[in-house]
Amino acid sequence: MTDNRDILITEVALRDGSHAIAHQYTVDQVLNVAKALSDANVPYIEVSHGDGLAGSSLQYGLSKTDEMKLIEAAVSVAGESKIAVLLLPGIGTLHELKEAANLGAKMARIATHVTEADVSAQHIAYAKELGMETVGFLMMSHMAPVDKIVEQAKLMESYGADTVYTVDSAGYLLPDQVRERIRALKQSVGVNVGFHGHNNLSLAMANTLAAIDEGANRIDGSVRCLGAGAGNTQTEVLIAVLERMGIQTGVDLYKMMDLAEEIVAPILHVPQEITRDSLTLGYAGVYSSFALHAKRAAEKFNVDSRDILIELGKRKVVGGQEDMIVDVAAEIAKARMK
Ligand SMILES: CC[C@H](O)CC(=O)C(=O)O
Ligand SMILES: [Mn+2]
């Protein structure tokens, strides 16, 4: 593996991308994608249900394949790359974390709502005990002021996180807002700082570059943008842009392009675009993974999915409250009948 990397990329298509295909990954798809990512020298490859370990459920969406089988498959072809898993405390437990570590996962990313870092303490500590590298992943970062994010990141650092992330789950943040968050984290924590963007307002690349400019050295990307909502910062494009800027990622651009075109594009049910629904997510500040749930609820209640998303934004609904999507759709349908 190349040592002189300025930025370490975590590829999230096999986790965040799972939202975009309703968690229908097969072992063969994961083998092919993970092998190609490893051949391209991507340092970290995240594999889990879209909502993290143990996310497979009626509430979040049932996986086609047990995620442990997917993790095992990815590990078998990972070579020098490290397999990462995502865990949201309350959805996943220490049990799944141990199972993933036993299968060979080397990094645990513990994700909480931006104001709830305290629930990550035991998961971060346990992941360290298991010998894993740990990341504190502060989701929906647009919903808290900068000083709150710093406070929460410091908590994660105190639990043992090696890296803390600002996560723009809704694809809502503007580049200046990313800058102020990353700058404050760089000034306040002693660990690596990372950024995870969503492209709902077509700002994932601009936001990622702003984060890097402020000193973030851990960056998430998704090949062919495969992620929730309009997807994430497109990895192969990011590699090209960073190469032009003289920033080393150690990732092979041509191999990433080939993977995107030949292996990942055929997996996509529909091309990853900024649709009216994903644009509404970014505009209203709604969790990107709500998009498919809102679409289904809109069809069921014959209402406009944008009205559902705007209302969810007003109510400041966060991850874990997916059941509210149906409630809101039903309320909108009922109000229309009056
Ligand atoms: C449901 C977990 C979520 O997809 C994590 C994430 O990638 C984000 O908040 O953007
Ligand atoms: Mn995401």
Image: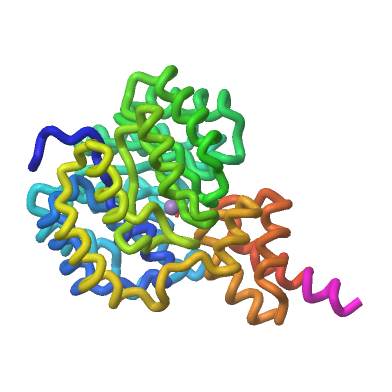
Residue 297 position in % (x across, y down)? 63, 74
Q: Quadrant of the C terminus?
A: bottom right
Q: Nearer the viewer, residue 147 or 283?
A: 283
38 to 134, vertically: above or below = below
| Residue at 61 percent of width and 40 percent of height | 143
Q: Is residue 69 visible?
A: no
The magenta segment: 332-338
> Does 275 sit left or right of 307 as displayed?
left
Q: Which residue appears farthest toward the right when viewing the image?
A: 338
| Residue at 13 percent of width and 33 percent of height | 4
133 to 241, vertically: above or below = above
> Does 235 sit left or right of 302 as displayed?
left
Quarter-of-image position of residue 261: bottom left
Q: Is residue 114 visible?
A: yes
187 to 175, vertically: above or below = above
Residue 295 position in % (x across, y down)? 59, 73
> Does 190 sit left or right of 168 as displayed?
left
269 to 203, vertically: above or below = below
Quarter-of-image position of residue 207: top left
Q: Nearer the viewer, residue 242 or 118?
A: 242
Q: Quadrant of the N terminus?
A: top left
Residue 269 position in % (x across, y down)? 39, 78
Is 336 a magenta residue?
yes
| Residue at 54 percent of width and 44 percent of height | 140
Is 303 a magenta residue?
no
| Residue at 52 percent of width and 51 percent of height | 171
